[in-house]
Amino acid sequence: MKLNGSRIMVTGGAGFLGGYVVGALQERGVASIFVPRRSQYDLRERKDIRRALDDARPEMVIHLAAVVGGIGANSANPGRFFYENAIMGIELIEQARLAGVAKLVTVGTVCSYPKFTPVPFREEDLWDGYPEETNAPYGLAKKMLLVQGQAYREQYGFNSIYLMPVNLYGPGDSFDPQNSHVIPALIKKCLDAKEAGASAITVWGTGSASREFLYAGDAAEGIVLAAERYDGGDPVNLGVGSEITVRDLVRTIARITGFNGTIEWDGSKPDGQPRRALETERARRLFGFDAGTSFEEGLRHTVEWYRTIRERERTRSTA
């Protein structure tokens, strides 16, 4: 689908990943990018979705909006995370079909994979078990949108594609301790400890779990490439194809932030999924996506961005 000159609605376009996606669309000359803001459109409500589609008249919808968080937030809000993610997607896909939207891009989650999926995760493994318990409600809600998209393709000929990015990170991420993911949480923890002169930090779990991380700018490029070039019904992973243990991740972030204290592990807290790394060949083959940002480079960009934000907030508070 040619994006230059088109009209596209991006749910969640004002969020972390959404900002990168909107930027990538602008670079491609999209004529009109409509971002439904929460203050004006409640995407849990059918009438608001209809109104957003009427206002935007999009040829394509990219669905990024989600209620997300780390292990703690998922554990504390399983019902809310299931309902709000499911209802937003289900109603949006139905109303987009009725409105005659030519293509819908749903961005799912790596959390939909079974807990003990063999590494690397292949798209064919998606239905081989139940997701890791702490984020299963969120992962399953997002997974149902794949089912809906495939069903609508079969019955109505609706062009709905489904992408599954691995854990994202980068400048602009949430550093709020209540809902941040592991990388921003660790960056904040290390910088807080360094500024306070603390001799140690405590990290959840044992450090043995592994994760794969995709720079948000690279994820946005993958989403836009799929929007342009991919029209199939099969789900597609977006990742880098390599993993790092949480223990090594903490050491790397400590080094980059300059925290030289002790790292203590709280084994009473969950590790989450034991391993997480994606097979990325399908994205490469179907729409030419390869992540271009090295992990070290991406982490340094993220740390420097957050340092700038902290300094700006400190200056504002003392002005």
Image (spheres, rainbow, N blue to C red):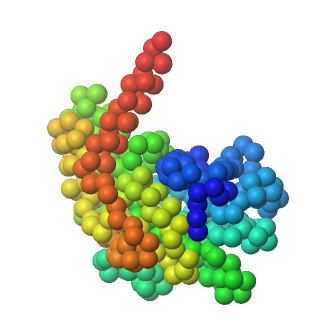
Question: What residue is shown at x 32% (from left), y 57% (from top)?
Answer: 292
Where is residue 121 shown, x and y percent of the image?
36, 77
Q: Relative to residue 1, is residue 180 depicted above or below?
A: above
Asked whether residue 128 appears in the rendered view, the answer is: yes
Q: Relative to residue 218, is residue 287 depicted above or below?
A: below
Quadrant in the rendering for residue 213: bottom left
Q: Nearer the viewer, residue 119 or 8?
A: 8
Quarter occupied by the N terminus: bottom right
Q: Nearer the viewer, residue 238 or 130?
A: 238
Q: Relative to residue 256, is residue 126 depicted above or below?
A: below
Is residue 108 rendered to the left or right of residue 309?
right
Where is residue 257 shown, x and y percent of the image?
25, 38
Q: Nearer the viewer, residue 192 or 213?
A: 213
Question: What residue is shown at x 67% (from left), y 56% (from top)?
Answer: 7
Quadrant in the rendering for residue 222: bottom left
Where is residue 174 shown, x and y percent of the image?
47, 44
Question: What residue is shown at x 38% (from left), y 80% (from top)?
Answer: 122
